[in-house]
Image (cartoon, rainbow, N blue to C red):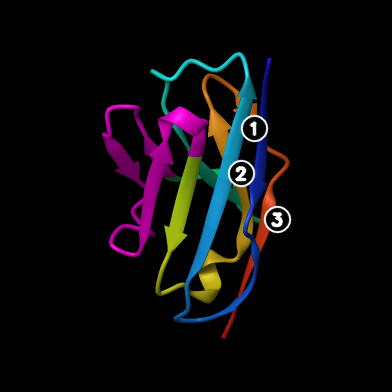
Amino acid sequence: QVQLVESGGGLVQAGGSLNLSCIASGDIFAINAMGWFRQTPTKHRELVATMTSGGITDYGDSVKGRFTISRDNAKNMVFLQMNSVKPEDTAVYYCWYPPNYWGQGTQVTVSS
C-alpha cells in the first residue's frame, strides 16, 4: 500500500503562483514515476505533469510552459510549481503514484 498526502492548495489570483507538495509513504520504490493530475466537476481527471526518478517529464498541453514538476527522491516527495495561473486551472489536484494510487486531493481556486 502507498499513502499520498498533498499540501499547498488554496486561493490565488490569476497571474499568480502556487506550489503544491506531495509526500509518499508505504511501499515506495524510488524508480517509479510520480505526478499530478487534476479534476473539475465537469471534466475527467486529466494529466498535469509526471516525472520519472531519472528526471523525464511529461506535461499536459494546457500547462506546458507555466507549471514545473520536480521531486526529491530521497524524501519520496513530488512538487508542482504553478506559475501564471489562469481561472481554468481551478480544480482539485491529485498526487499520483503508479499504478493507481491517489492522494486525497487539494483544491486550487484561481480568481479572475
Residue 54 drawn at (x, y percent)? 27, 28
Kindly identify the amino acid type of the residue bearing the numbered disc 1. Answer: Trp
- Judge depth for marks 2 and 3 and give the one in front: 2
Determine if the magenta segment contains residue 67.
yes
Mark 2 crowdedness (10 Å alpha carbons): few <14, some 14-19, many ≥20? many
Q: Residues in magenta?
A: 49-77
Work out whether mark 2 precedes mark 3 in sequence or the reverse, and give the earlier one.
3
Residue 27 drawn at (x, y percent)? 61, 13
Which residue corresponds to mark 1?
A: 102
Residue 50 drawn at (x, y percent)? 40, 38
Which residue corresponds to mark 3?
A: 41
Judging depth in this view, the residue of 98 and 44 nearest the camera is 98
Where the N terminus falls, by quadrant?
top right
Residue at x 34%, y 65% (from the top left corner): 66
Kindly identify the amino acid type of the residue bearing the numbered disc 3. Answer: Pro
Kindly identify the amino acid type of the residue bearing the numbered disc 2. Answer: Tyr
Residue 33 drawn at (x, y percent)? 41, 27
Label 2–label 1 contact, CB within 8 A: yes
Label 3–label 1 contact, CB within 8 A: no
- Judge depth for marks 3 and 1 and give the one in front: 1
**Image quadrant in which you'd find residue 112:** bottom right
Work out whether mark 2 precedes mark 1 in sequence or the reverse, and give the earlier one.
2
Label 2–label 3 contact, CB within 8 A: no
Judging depth in this view, the residue of 98 and 30 nearest the camera is 30
* Label 2 to label 1: alpha-carbon separation: 6 Å
Determine if the magenta segment contains residue 61.
yes
Left or right, 101 with respect to 65, comes to right
Residue at x 26%, y 34% (from the top left corner): 56
Which residue corresponds to mark 2?
A: 94
* Label 3 to label 1: alpha-carbon separation: 17 Å
**Image quadrant in which you'd find residue 84:** bottom left
Work out whether mark 3 precedes mark 1 in sequence or the reverse, and give the earlier one.
3
